[in-house]
Image (cartoon, rainbow, N blue to C red):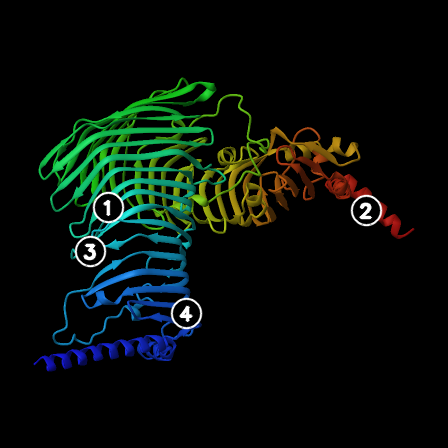
Amino acid sequence: MNVWMRRLAWTLGGLVLLSVAVGGYLLATFDPNRYQGLLTDWVKSHKQRTLVIGAPMELKLFPKLRLKLTKVSLSEHQQPAEFLAVDEAELSVDMLALFKRQLVIDRIGAQGVRLVYRRDADGRSNIDDLLKKDEKPPEPGAPAEPLTFDVAAIQLERVSAKVDDAKTGVVGTLAINRLTSGHLADGVPSDIQLDAGFDLTQPRLAKGGVTGEFRLTPRLGLATPSAELDRVKMTLQGDVPGVKALKAELTGAVAWDGERQSVKAQSLAIEVSGQVGGQANAPALLVEQGRLSVDSFSYDPGQQLLALGKLVVALKARQSDRGLALDLDWPALDVKGDQLKGSPLKGQLKVTGPIEVAATFASQAPTGGFALVKVPGLKLDFTAAMAGAGGQRRQVKGALLTDVTARPREGAGALEALRLQASIQEPSLQPLQVQLNGHAALAGEAAQWSLKGQLNDNPFSSDGSLKLGGKVPQVQATAHFTSLDLNRLLPVPAAGASPPAGTKAGGEAPDAPVDMGALNSIDGQFKFKADKLAVRQYRLVDAELAATVEAGRLTLSRLAAGAWGGKVLAHGTADAGSQRLALQAQAEGINILAMLKDVAGKDMLEGTGQVKLDIQTGGAKVSQWVAGLNGDASLQLRDGAVRGINLAKSLRDVKAQWSGKSDAVQKSSQTEKTDFTELTGTFQIKHGVAHNEDLSAKSPFLRVGGKGDINLVERRLNYTVSATVTGTVKGQDGAEAEALKGLTVPVRLSGPFDAPDWKIAWSEVAVGAIQNTVKSRLQEQLKDPVQQQKLKDKLLKGLFK
């Protein structure tokens, strides 16, 4: 027996030694690069991608599986274009743990990784084939439990991904400059350090980076993974849509339960600074300091729990010469099912600058439950002051009272029973009382409102909706006023204030910038009506406006109003991308003198009739808009007058003009005017110069034609009026003026709009006038029988002489 035992022992020992020897030989002679071709062939046949390994593989099998690859690339699916490139990657796995269904990774490392990710609008991406699961059913007896994993450390450097996602609209580059972690396993805290960047071109330009550290505790044993983050200290810096030079710091601790969809936070604080907006005509809002902090926050929809402790919001910002300060404090809120306990919120708001506002707000204690949290009696008392007429200060005092409601489970809220009362006091105006009632509701990223109110005794109403979450806010709004005087709401420049730099006489600022950038910040549909409307010098009735804004383009589908005794209709477009404007307008039955006074500050023309306009222009400044003006215009007027000269009077004074033996130059005079019964004309506008060839005006004494240029760029006239005398001239010097009957008298207008010269070219009509005089006297002689006989005798003597 002992002999057989010894033999068995020697046999087993020999097998062990043989196994060790064979294993040692295999490990010593194993060459992983022999299988490189098999690997690339497998990827080609199973994934239809081309795998290239540009350097020898390094592989160790025992005691840990260690694989190292360098200069690796992978093509797109069934395409030669590069999908993935790796300068160096390393993976180390514990082989013995695999037999226990445990994936224990000693190290994951990668450097110089470049990835291209694309997805179309239907959700198809260039990684779908890699994520596709094997439809082959598992073999009988195969374990159903997934592998548990344990990673000792992760280290990534220079990892970047080019993203072109049509479904979300994201286009750009995401990068991990460096990522290191400690031990990663279920329930094990791990320290993470991150340095990442982003450079996006769509949906809007964004460029910056995220740096910091936190401790991560993953919870992977649940059906839905969860995680806890504490010791968070993260910083975001860069430019994001709407904010330049953004700096945001996040500190605190957050726990997320994926299965229960609950969130908990402790000592959470967010501090931000940066420049919001900023256009040529709207300076950026500089957020000097913004802070939101909460000692504790809990949200668990399953348990119907919502709680916060010591919520504090503080904001300080500046815009040019304006300042803004906001403080809000909400000590406590505790909601459990139908039970709610909490404290009132309170705060203050202060605005400095040309418009100064001081406000305080406070609420009553909250009520309700998890289904509906209500903060009743939120009251805002405010006082505002601004510049008024004559240097006087305009004051606005009032109060806003509302109930705030929130539905935590639905992510919705509302301002119910919204009530506003305010009074505007300013020495040059009657007191203006404002009353407003209505409500507003917020559900997720959508808001709706319905308001009714009064400005003094003039009712108004407004309804609309607002959607956020897209590239820009989406707005639909309507408003109706029975009477609206905006002059009572707009600040009035103080007396003696200097005009802006570059402003010419008459109030124009030809080099003032024209910026349509605001059209890029909103999309929507807008409708406005006012039975009576006053804006600066304009007085309108039955005003209507319907417009849409989409992708930076304004489409004015209808603008209608009663003005200057008639009706004005217009439609047009404005494009922020090209900085161009197109407008078609028609005014019927208007008083042209009233229109010119309001629009241009001029009073050179009188009459009632029709004006049509079809123009296009564009540019970055007002001067460029004037110089780029092109289109057509026409007018038809009746029973009016041209101010500046009295042609009839000048023609009656023909004797004085001839005696001077030169053309007469007259300065424009507002006390003189030339009447007409009808006036028509069309104008072709090119590069800011309006050219006319067919001016026609009629009166009992004259027929007037004209042609020439109206230079809007230089604000000068170069025009010739041809006046033809058609009626009988009466009064002193009537005989001399009668000599002009039937003749055309050129009258040249030249000079600046404000004071053009009128030059009557008497020298060009002198010969015709003499001929008319001789003809007239001869006809008078022929009417006398005695003179007729004398003329016959002279003719007979001449024939037989």
Mark 3 or 1, which is nearer the eye? 3
Q: Neighbour class for label 3 at 10 Å: few (<14), some, many (≥20)?
A: some
Q: Nearer the viewer, mark 3 or mark 2?
A: 3
Numbered disc in front, either 1 or 4: 4
Is residue 773 toward the left or the right of residue 27 in the image? right
> Badge 4, how many Cα within 10 Å: few under 14, some, many 20+?
some
The kind of residue tagged 4 is: Val
Q: Foreground residue, 155 or 719?
A: 155
What residue is disc 2 on? 792
- Looking at the picture, does residue 481 appear above or below residue 560? above
Residue at far right of view: 801
Q: CA distance from mark 1 to mark 4?
A: 45 Å
Alpha-carbon span between mark 3 and mark 1:
30 Å
**CA–CA distance between discs 2 and 1?**
110 Å
User: What's the residue type where badge 2 is placed?
Assistant: Lys
Disc on the earlier residue, 1 or 4: 4
Of callouts 3 and 2, which one flags the residue occurring earlier in the amino acid sequence? 3
Q: Residues within 10 Å of mark 2 (few under 14, many from 20)?
A: few
Q: Position of residue 575 (x, y in %)?
A: 46, 50
The amino acid beneath tag 1 is Gly
Of marks 2 and 4, the one in the foreground: 4
Q: Which residue is tagged 3?
A: 220
Q: Which residue corresponds to mark 1?
A: 444
CA neighbours of label 1 inside 10 A, class few (<14), some (14 to 19), many (20+): few
Residue at label 4? 72
